Image: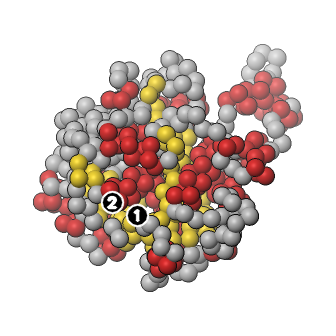
Amino acid sequence: MSRRVGITGVGVISAAGLGIDALWDAVVAGQSAVRRIERFDPDAWETHVAGEVRDLSVSKIVPKHYRKATKIMALDIQLAVTAADCAVRDAGLTTPGTDVDAPRSYPGERTGVHIGAGLIAADVEELTAALIEARTDDGAFDMHAWGRDGMNHLTPLWLLKYLPNMLACHVTIIHEAQGPSSTITCSEASATLSMNESVRVIQRGGADVCFGGGADSKINPLACYRQIASGRVTDSLGDPAAAVRPFDSDANGTAIGEAGALLVMEELAAAQTRDARIYAEIVGFGASHTLGDPAAPYDPPGDGRGLKQAITAALRQADCQPADIDLIIPTGLGIPTFDLEELAALQSVFGERAAGTPIWSVTPYVGNSSAAHGAVAAAVACRALAEQTLPATINCDQPLGSFATATAPSKPADLQHVLLFQTSYAGQNAAVILKKV
């Protein structure tokens, strides 16, 4: 486990646009990409805003010989495939997915894929066409009619669009990655946990290069309703750009987002041998689970105990003290109970350092991209380390705690270590520390 791991490629597609440059330009300029939903009419909902990806054409991304497969790609899969393409090109690697005839940079059996995924919501129009045929004479749903007639109106390959493991499946096929592969479905913690899985595989010698991160889309009527019913979503009908307010006393919920974000992680010595650009080294990781009240299992307890364990473990593994951390990127959803949970954990770990360490969240810019969220944040952290720049903090005019920085423009900074962490809807926590190389 002595092999070191560096991040050499960053691939992201979000509401800010395609590629890390689009996202980085937005966070430096302080320009939110949260807007009114266009994919369907949101007037019937309690919220009208989201971090929506627009103008995605996956058929232009995949190799020509693979384009027929796009017919069975749900949007989540398309986001993952697009992010993987961006990441491998950003890393300067060659795979069969980028050039089928060129020699590949790493053998397929030495290439792994670990992707965080959500529970993909089926397309409403596809389901409706089948449900219509499963009604009784009085219009009620009939389970027997569904099995006999309704399901016959779904395409035979319908299920392959909506299995969470299909994100990793398509990425492995396109890039002929034949090494270890896994899918993690732990809500907002998924991407960070998947990144760590890639790190562990490389450290133990199971692969030399891995794709790690996540992709998720919840901007469809079924998934939107679930988020709204859970009480997590902002009810702001004013300026969309100001709707999400992490760690602000006026925060009243998050905005649903979608994104694909994958990082290329390589064994550090191999990356240095090929003279790769190395954004950062992954030096610490920690994971834990928060036990809430059984009567309200999805509400954090407010004391930050579970999250503190993950952060402390990451610091210990990185051989870092709180004073070594130059930037903190938490989940920062803008949901008051979750924000207070994160602030409690930070106060417990950082103590007197609480007032002097910048805290920043990507959520006001692109919404809560759930299973992709940690990797979107990691993508920004990589650029922040490379550019030695703190991105702009927005929508935090009345901070809740001493960590929360009031609205400020981007500015140069000496960044050596960045702490990222996520606390999820179901209680999983994950923390990672990136170090400038």
**Residue drawn at x 27%, y 65% as measured from the top left:** 416
Question: How did the renderer colour the structure?
Answer: secondary structure
Side of 324 where 252 appears, left or right: right
Name the amino acid type tagged 2. Answer: Leu
Which residue corresponds to mark 2?
A: 385
Kindly tell me whether residue 16 is visible in this rendering: yes
Which residue corresponds to mark 1?
A: 279
Q: CA distance from mark 2 to mark 1?
A: 7 Å
Residue density around tag 2, few if under 14, some if 14–19, many if 20 or more, within 10 Å: many
Displayed quadrant of residue 178: bottom right
- Residue 422 in the image: state x and y as whole percent: 39, 54
Name the amino acid type tagged 1. Answer: Tyr
**Residue drawn at x 42%, y 32% as measured from the top left:** 34
Regarding mark 2 in the picture, which secondary structure is present there?
helix
Q: Nearer the viewer, residue 156 or 6?
A: 6
**Residue drawn at x 32%, y 29% as measured from the top left:** 242
Query: Does the residue at mark 2 contact the one at mark 1 (Cβ under 8 Å)?
Result: yes
Regarding mark 1 in the picture, which secondary structure is present there?
loop
